[in-house]
Amino acid sequence: MTDDASTILLVEDDDATRSFLADNLLADGHDVITADCARHGWRLMETKFPDLALVDVGLPDGSGLDLVRRVREADGVASRVDPLLPILVLSGRRGELDRIRGFEKGCDDYVVKPFSYSELRARVSALLRRAHRRPGMGRLRVGTLELDPPSREVTVRGKRVDLSQKEFALLRALAAEPLRVFTKEELLRGVWGFRSFGVTRTLDSHACRLRQKLGRDGDRYVVNVWGVGYRLVDGPVGA
Ligand code: CA
C-alpha cells in the first residue's frame, strides 16, 4: 500500500459486479472494502472511514439512495460518518429523472449499468482528486486557534479549550473556510442535519457559548454577521 492509496467502499449486492469492481480497483492500487447490503455499508463507513464509496441503488435491505441521504444527514461528529464522503452511485436506471433523483439525495456522481470500467475509473479519480483538496479530517489552524478533528482537541495559543460535541462540530464547519460567512441554514443542515430550518435559536445559543469559550483571552473568533449567519474570524487571521 502506498501513502496515497485510497480506501474505497463498495456497497453492491451482485456478487459478480462486486468482485469485478473490487479486483480492478485493487489492481489500480486502491484499498477496497466491500458490503453486500446498506446496513453493512453504513457500519463500514462508521468504522473504516473510507475515502470514497461506490453505492448500488438496488440493495436487499433498501435503496442505496437512502444510504446516500443518511450519510449527507450525518453530523460528522456523533455518528463518526463523514457527511462529505464522496459517493458515486451505480444504477441500472438510466432515465433523466432517476439521475436527478440520485443527485438530489446527495450523490456526487452517477454511473449507469452496464458501465465501462475505464470510465468508472476516471470518475473515481476525479472525485478523489477533488476530495483531497477539501479541508477534511486533517488538523486545522486559524491564527492562534488549532483544531484536531480525530481527537477533537481544540487549543487557543496552545491552551486547551473544552467544547461539547455540537460546539466542536460547529467550529469545525466554520474552520473549513475561515473567512466565509456561513448562513444559519447551512450551519443547521451541516451540523444538526435539520431538514426544516426553524430552529435557529439552538444554533445561536451554541455559537454564543463557542464564542465565549474561545474568546476568554479577548480573542474574537466567532463573528455573528447580523441577519445572515456566522463566520469564524473577523478581519485578517493573526492580526
Ligand atoms: Ca443490486
Image (cartoon, rainbow, N blue to C red):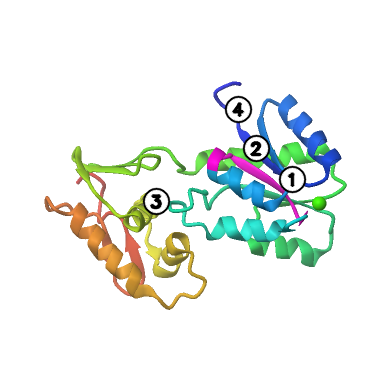
Which is closer to the viewer, label 1 or label 3? 1
Mark found first going from the N terminus, 1 or 4: 4
* Mark 2 within 8 Å of ligand 1, using the beta carbon: no
User: Where does label 4 land, which residue?
Assistant: 5
User: Where does label 2 land, which residue?
Assistant: 8
User: Where does label 3 land, which residue?
Assistant: 177
Front-most of 219 and 77?
A: 77
- For the record, the magenta segment spans 47-59
Disc 4 packing (10 Å; few <14; some 14–19; many ≥20): some
Query: Residue 56 at what x, y percent from top left?
Result: 75, 51
Query: Residue 140 at what x, y percent from top left?
Result: 35, 41
Image quadrant where one finds the N terminus? top right
Q: Residue 142: in sight, yes or no? A: no
Residue drawn at point x = 56 percent, y = 38 percent: 48
Quadrant of residue 166 in the image? bottom left
Query: Residue 134 at what x, y percent from top left?
Result: 49, 44
Disc 2 + disc 1, Cβ < 8 Å:
no
Q: CA distance from mark 2 to mark 1?
A: 14 Å
Quadrant of residue 145 in the image? top left
Confirm whether the magenta stretch covers residue 165. Answer: no
Which is closer to the viewer, label 3 or label 4? 4
Name of the residue lying farthest toward the top: 2
Disc 1 packing (10 Å; few <14; some 14–19; many ≥20): some
Residue 36: mark: 1
Q: CA distance from mark 2 to mark 4?
A: 9 Å
Q: Secondary structure at mark 1?
A: loop
